[in-house]
Image (cartoon, rainbow, N blue to C red):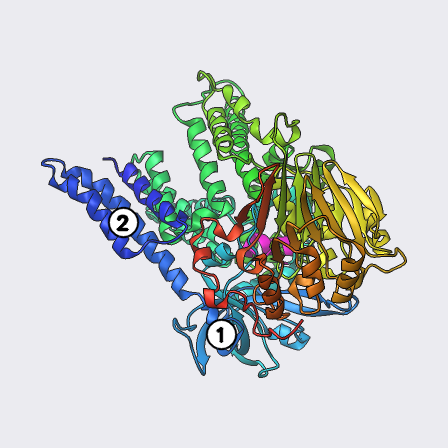
Amino acid sequence: MSPTALLWAYALAIVFVGSLPQLPSWSELATFGVVILAPVLILPGRGWLSVPFIATLLGAGWGLWHNQHALEQRLPLSAHGANFLVEVQVVSLPRPSLTESAFDEAAATSSVRFSVRVLRVHGRDLSPPLQGQLLDLTWYSIDEGVLTQLRGGSLWLLPVRLKPPRGSVNPHGFDYEGWLLRRGVYATGYVHPQVQPPQYLGLQPGIPALRHWLRDKLLETAETRGELLSALLLGDRGGIDAGDQRLLRETGTAHLLAISGLHVGMVTGFFMLVGGLLGRAIGICTGATPRGITLLFALSASLIYTLLSGAPLSAQRALVMTWVLLLVWQWRRRISSGFAYALALALVLTIQPLAFYGAGFWLSFIAVGALLLGFRGRQYLCQAHKRGGRLLGSTAGLLRSQWLVTVALLLPSLVFFSGFSPGGLLLNLIAIPWLGFLVLPPLMLGVLLLVTTPGAWCINFAAWQLDALMHFLGGGHNLLPSWQILGPPAEVGLLVLSALGAVLLLLPPGLPGRNLGWLLLLPPLLPFLPRVGEGEWLRVTVLDVGQGLAVVVHTPRQRLLYDTGPISGSGWSAGREIIVPYLIGEGVLALDTVVVSHGDRDHAGGFAGLAESLPVAHLIAPGRLERRLGEKARRTSPCVAGGEEILGDLRLRWLWPDSTDITGEENDHSCVAVIEWHGVQILLAGDVPAEVERQLAKSYPLSGPVDLLLAPHHGSRSSSSNALIAWAAPRRVVFSAGFRHHFGHPHPDVVARYAASGAALFSTAKSGALVFTWMRGAGAPLVEVARAAPRFWYADHTDGADAEWRLSRRSQLW
């Protein structure tokens, strides 16, 4: 069997183990190996057949060991919220930001996020120990003087409060827990100076300190675009303003500032040229050109650049692929492109067996695979004697390569980023060589000569070119079609068909059936087409937005959102980061109705981020809140008791508030609605307190038990009174709350009351997002739980049965 096939068997085995919903035990893997290998070894003359099975078992064994080790290193749930005193080294570039107060938006304090390596634990430690682990920390309300000391490479004695890696889990959403696991971060937390004053211990020379010094020098030297230069050199994108980020995303050029194969390859090529020129100069002077100097320069430059960029997974992957190609080139071996591709794949998965969960993994390997496939077996010849023939041939090759990459990355762009930029093809044709020839080389040369006047000239030339490039992209954004929101096909079969269509289009021109690929690429357009013959259904999705609320009510003819989740003090928006990806993934590109129950940040905070991304036809909110938020919707109206909305096949009856002369900001101003659909009743009650619940029970008799109730105020003790439970008689109750949040929702007494009523209880804190789907006439709904997704780190990371509702150490608060 060929070495290429063995490498593929090894790599696919790693991917298979990482894709399992729960990791097998070593005994199960050993049993599988014996069952597979024994018949092969027994057969006479067939021992060679065992080689691919051995490669497969090696891959599976490595993936299993790595993944089990990662799970074992995570902070145990029993230590959630525990305080530790640790000596640490800052290993990242700290990212300061302004954090708004949840109670006073005018008051803002400085906060900073950074990563540290634990050097020593004072006092009690854990098993496994914290020493040597990587932590992601936040320092809130940091003093400006302390912030100047918090540098890459600095040593500190910090009191920290830690928690295990935990994030919101939603369909089509960002997997925060998986991202932390791939980075090797096994706990997160914040500095807790109230326990003990933090102590600065000094500065440790090394790569982190060098990176921070380079960032300071770049920002000090560059007359413009210093933050973009820092992103290109150091992978530090924290300083890029929102406008530039939006421009890069909408023009399909965001990859220009994400350290990847493009940057590592360009830096490698530049230093290959420098090494080659130096080798020739030495040869002229000595009469003998040193062997390997070009390779040495290229390997060293790619490694140093990767380290300076912070060695993100994308840069590590690019480094591996670059080194494979360089060594193949140096040895002058006739190694097939397929073998080099498989070798790079196997090495990347050996370094990080979970790398295939990241978007960059697919973008890198699909782009390279597209170029190999598109140019395979084909040479584009031009008559060299004709004037300009070689230039035309190079231009044609450049255009074709850009076309191949664009087609190949269309589907991954829909899957990972929920859209694509039609104008990106033309803009990247100019932007990539511009960056590669006029920005990166002078930037690298300027870094080498950083403390000299020529170095400052080079850096400012790179900054000037980068500024001109951004202005060019801005002009292109105005002239060409920009970012188009579009999700991937919802069904796996359609996704596979679309991928097959892309593969057909990548084949060299002239092959039979190649143009059939255009037809197979049509499934992503299905959300724009009218749906014919679809059955009647109601889908209610309670998204996992942490301590907040966001409920999507969806039928074939109507799309309604009740509440928009929270916004953090640093600007993170559940509307933009959770709700929009979910809606696009479900084929919802516009909202018919958005109801904001009241003005609390955990209910209304995400509205601005939502409205920036998706059009909102109708906004409903209580009192004057309607006018405050109404600028971002086509039409607005207040919710008021006794009112009614007919939305396609949905009927909304408003039960509260009883006046429009209110601010709409308080809990007892919340919009309370009963949604009715073919006999199904959904009760949405915002954060109303028990007093309002008792008034509702007296004033509005219900036609029968409520099929689904969103527990008022997240299950707080101030709500969910006996009067509400007796009035609504809910069959199912959902608590939308943060995992072990300090508010302590849901309160144990509230849980006990609902349980005594016979209702089925659900919590987003435990289950992630919850999807309830009713088919007309089918009775009970189908219930889907986001944390039941096939991710082994979800199965290993839940509360035990004895702590099912102990979601906080402060269970007496409300």
Could you tell me residue 551's position as x and y percent? 66, 50
In the displayed structure image, the side of residue 579 where residue 40 appears, left or right: left
Q: Give coordinates of residue 810: x percent, y percent.
A: 60, 74
Principal secondary structure, stretch drawn in magenta: helix
Residue to which mark 1 is pinned:
88
The quarter of the rendered structure image containing the C terminus is bottom right
| Residue wearing tag 2 | 58
Q: Which residues, given as a range, are shown in magenta?
A: 227-238
Residue 568 seen anywhere in this rendered image of the structure:
no
Q: Nearer the viewer, mark 2 or mark 1?
A: 2
Is residue 85 visible to the viewer in this orientation of the structure?
yes
Residue found 76% across the figure and 69% down from its top: 103
Give the SS element for disc 1.
Answer: strand
- Asked if the residue under mark 1 is in contact with the one under mark 2, i.e. CB atoms within 8 Å, the reply is no
Decide: is 501 above or below 311: above
Q: Residue at x 38, y 49 (%)?
A: 349
Residue 809 location (% of width, % of height)? 56, 74
Which three-letter amino acid code belongs to the residue tagged 1? Val
Q: Report, in whole angstroms, how far the alpha carbon at label 2 lies from the one at label 1.
A: 36 Å
Mark 2 Cα shell of 10 Å, populated few (<14), some (14-19), many (≥20)? some
Going by the numbered disc 2, the residue's amino acid type is Leu
Q: Residue furthest left?
A: 44
In the displayed structure, 6 sits above or below 228; it is above
| Nearest to the observer: residue 386 or residue 270 | 270
* Residue at the (48%, 77%) spot, across then down: 87
